[in-house]
Amino acid sequence: MYGMICLPAVTKSPQRYDFYFTYASACELICKKMPFRFKNSLLFFSFQLFLLPLHRILPYYGHLMKKYRYMKHFKLWNTLCGWIAFAIATAVYLLTLEPSASFWDCGEFISSAWKLDVGHPPGAPFFMLMGRFFSLFAADTTQVALCVNALSALASSFTILFLFWTITALAKKLVQPDTLWKGIALLGAGMVGSLAYTFSDTFWFSAVEGEVYASSSLFTAVVFWLILKWDEQADEEGSDRWLIAIAYLMGLSIGVHLLNLLTIPAIVLVYYFRKYDFSWAGMCKAFFI
């Protein structure tokens, strides 16, 4: 009897078929070993009522576990593919790196970073500190410009890394990677978007010279990725640490370039839609405050 109950739940998977067949056989064996009086009792009837829905629940549980496995594997592949995009960007930028100073402000930034001077207003003090650190790896003064340019290359590569994770995080709001092909589609979208930005003319140009735009883009990418990370864990304890990290990095970014301040409206709106019910008045207040 219990084997017949199990049959509708059996799928094409041999492993799952073996599991349900073993489970049904165990149920039948338990029933055969029970005393006759117990079989006619109300307790046995309750036992049967328990087994019947259990046969129906187990396939659904298996389906949920399959989705969980896809989600778990997606997190792993999402991290791995992000670092693959980072490696591609790093290789491209370092191979095409400007060996000396480019036009406009690059020469000023490189020399100011090397001597820890103050550049043109607002000065970009944090960029000067980072440039000074990278210039310490120069074997002689002829390689100082190359090392400061390498700072921009690595900053741009990390921007691509966080851009990949931002794309997949936004795409997950539309499509959950609970199947193999959905996961591949999400990872493909992240890879196409991040590599398209990697080889875009303006970004590539800034990635190989000693300018503040590459480092500023990194801060912008990290801050926006952090607000999406907070949005994912907003209901969990300790999620406010992401907001503290955003405030800290935004303060540091002012020492590079003011571009990062443009993310404040987007961050405020993400916080508003996550914490409050939508209303036009509330959205206007959040936007203007």
Image (cartoon, rainbow, N blue to C red):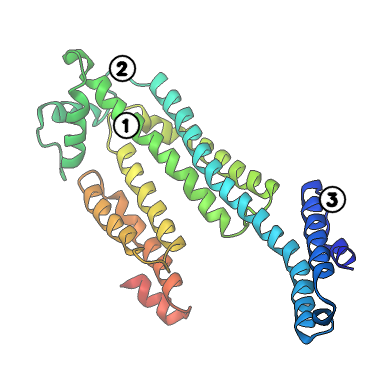
Residue that label 3 marks: 12
Alpha carbon distance from label 1 to label 2: 13 Å
Q: Position of residue 172 (x, y in %)?
A: 57, 55
Residue that label 2 marks: 99
> At 83% from the left edge and 79% from the top edge, which residue is drawn?
39
Q: Position of residue 216 (x, y in %)?
A: 31, 43
Quarter of the image where one finds residue 24: bottom right
> At 74% from the left edge and 76% from the top edge, which residue is drawn?
50
Alpha carbon distance from label 3 to label 2: 61 Å
Residue that label 1 marks: 152
> At 32% from the left edge and 64% from the top edge, which residue is drawn?
240
- Foreground residue among 31 and 277: 31
Q: Position of residue 56 (x, y in %)?
A: 77, 68
Tag shown at residue 25 = none
Position of 240 compared to 181: left or right? left
- Foreground residue among 36 and 173: 36
Camera sees residue 215 = yes
Label 1 crowd (10 A; few <14 / some 14-19 / many >=20): many
Label 2 crowd (10 A; few <14 / some 14-19 / many >=20): some
Q: Amino acid at mark 1?
A: Ser
